[in-house]
Amino acid sequence: MADEHKLIVKSFADVPYEPPEWLIEPYFPLNKVTLLQGDPGAGKTAFMCKMAALVSNGGKLLDKQVTQGNVLLLSVEDDSSTLRGRIEASGGDVSKCFLVEEAYAITFLHEGLQDAIKETNAKLVVFDPIQNFLGSDLQMNQSNQTRPILSYLAAVAQETNCAIVLVAHMAKAREGKSQVLRSLGSADIPGAARSVIQIGRDPANQGRCVAAHVKSSNAATGKSISYTIGERGGVLIGSYVDISAGDMDTSQTRTTNSVPYEAEKLVYIVRELMKENDNIERLSYETLNSIAGTTLDGRMWNAEVKRLSRELYIRDKIIVSAEDRKTESSFVWHGETIKSCGKSVRGLAVRKAPIIDLDKGGLNQ
């Protein structure tokens, strides 16, 4: 009699490899679930309407080819007329984009969901926002309740050969917390997604949005993409940008805490230094204190560098680092040349960043 508890074990050599398929590589995999997260008003829905427009025409997202197909939107945060306007303004073919009426009454487990995807032959299916489709009896913070739903959605994506995108609001940023785990609800939600994209604002230009790829299970993460929102909510794709989700979180935290970037002591000092200098290999902490009117020790200056270096690079294209001992540099401060003490000291290095053309990807209208 066979042992009913015996596990079936086999070699991976007997498992055929199936390369991933893409709606838009590497941001939106086919047959899988993608999570798109961002704060309210960050531009999440507008971005997805642009993706719907690109899919409807089979265009390009910068240099990435977009698989052409139909789109199915289930949204409760915007009315159908507004969504049509956004898709049209983003250059989409609305005859290939479909909606589900009264989507507010539908959950992920609705019996007609797979039929609707098959009927529309959708390659892209968007649920906006995820909270509305979990059902009133389900606690989204409970893994044991969300895990079966997410497994089911992954199976639906596989069976219908579509890319399912879940739009989610984010929890408040906390230092040290992974961007992958920023969406509201159970950690199983981003965990089940094969791709996670975070939407936010450019720290140096609040009128510009950024889509940062923070998780990719089937390829290397993609570069961050800038875009602007115009008339009728239409989106104009800009370029690849060197802005991370962490950069956007830092900027958002600064806004929340009402601490102006310009008021930071380190920001003021390095801005003033770079008006008359291009590269200062070493400024001792003692010298920094003398020109800044502070009494910070090396540990405190290093903490300021760690906290502000990325923002200084993004906003001002200034590179600041705390390095090992070097001979202190001479520099110019408000027209006066400050001579080196001639000693090897601990301190900061400050220089202007090289100019890089981030618009090489061109515009995608």
Image (cartoon, rainbow, N blue to C red):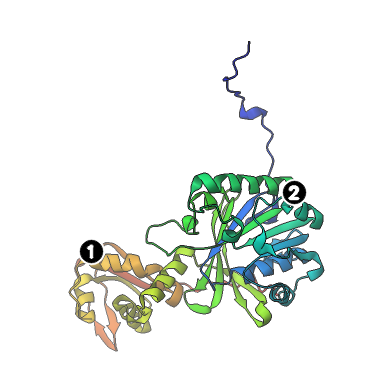
Q: Nearer the viewer, residue 193 or 21?
A: 193
Q: Give the image location of residue 73, x and y in percent.
A: 70, 63
Mark 1 or mark 2, which is nearer the start of the sequence? 2
Residue 158 — which label? none
At 66% from the left and 31% from the top, the residue drawn is 15
In this rendering, the answer to whether 220 lies above or below 77 is above
Q: Distance between the residues labelled 2 and 1?
A: 56 Å
In the drawing, does residue 98 fall left or right of residue 207? right
At 67% from the left and 44% from the top, the residue drawn is 155
Which residue is identified by label 2?
160
Please identify the quarter of the rendering in which residue 69 is found.
bottom right
Q: Nearer the viewer, residue 134 or 129?
A: 134
**Is there any visible trace of residue 84 in the rendered image?**
yes
Q: Find the residue positioned furthest to the top.
A: 1
Q: Give the image location of residue 258, x and y in percent.
A: 36, 78
Which residue is identified by label 1?
299
